[in-house]
Image (tube, helix red, strand yellow):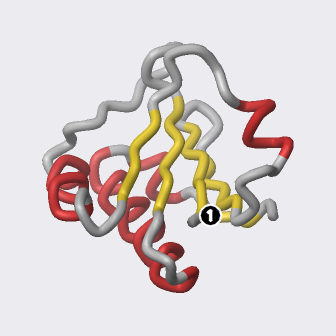
Amino acid sequence: MLKAYVNYPNPKVTIHRDPSCQSIQKMAKQRQRFVRINPKTISTELQRFKAKGYAFAANAAGNDMWLEADFGDAAFEVAVVKYVHHLIGEHYAPLGKAIIGTHC
């Protein structure tokens, strides 16, 4: 399982492979948007991203999101995050240009 932080105002996508990473705890906030993508939810969630079902904006409710990819295969989880990044980038150019980084 990995978690990826998506930030809109400061366009970036950061992958965290270690679920106990202190940065994950530090960036968590109340009412944080958190999207879980796993074998049961992948179709629904990818369609939602494709249809712009998750909006990004420069306000507290829409400026960031945590993605959790859980497939038991690290390479596939990274591929899912990259594809979600691609889908988001189709609607939000700053995020589309963001480079995916890895923290841990």
Structural crowding at the residue carrying mark 1, measured as other residues with C-alpha within 10 Å and reported as few (<14), some (14–19) or many (≥20): few
**Is 72 situated above or below 103?**
below
**Quadrant, the C terminus:** bottom right
Residue 40 or residue 4, whichever sits in front: 40
**Quadrant, the N terminus:** bottom right
Classify residue 1 as left or right of residue 95.
right
Q: Residue at x 18, y 47 (%)?
A: 48
Tell how many labels: 1
Q: Residue at x 76, y 34 (%)?
A: 25
Q: Estimate the x, y position of residue 87 in percent, counting from the top left.
A: 30, 59
Classify residue 47 as left or right of residue 33.
left
Q: Estimate the x, y position of residue 3 in percent, counting from the top left.
A: 59, 55
Q: Estimate the x, y position of residue 32 in percent, counting from the top left.
A: 52, 24
Identify the image quadrant of residue 39.
bottom left
Q: Estimate the x, y position of residue 46 in percent, counting from the top left.
A: 23, 59
Residue at mark 1: 99
Q: Residue at x 85, y 42 (%)?
A: 22
Q: Residue at x 16, y 54 (%)?
A: 44
Identify the image quadrant of residue 52.
top left
Instruction: Please identify the residue farthest to the right as the structure is shown.
Output: 22
Disc 1 marks which amino acid? Answer: Ile
Classify residue 37 as left or right of residue 51.
right
Q: Secondary structure at mark 1?
A: loop
Residue 51 or residue 35, whichever sits in front: 35
Residue 73 or residue 55, whichever sits in front: 73
**Is 38 situated above or below 59?**
below
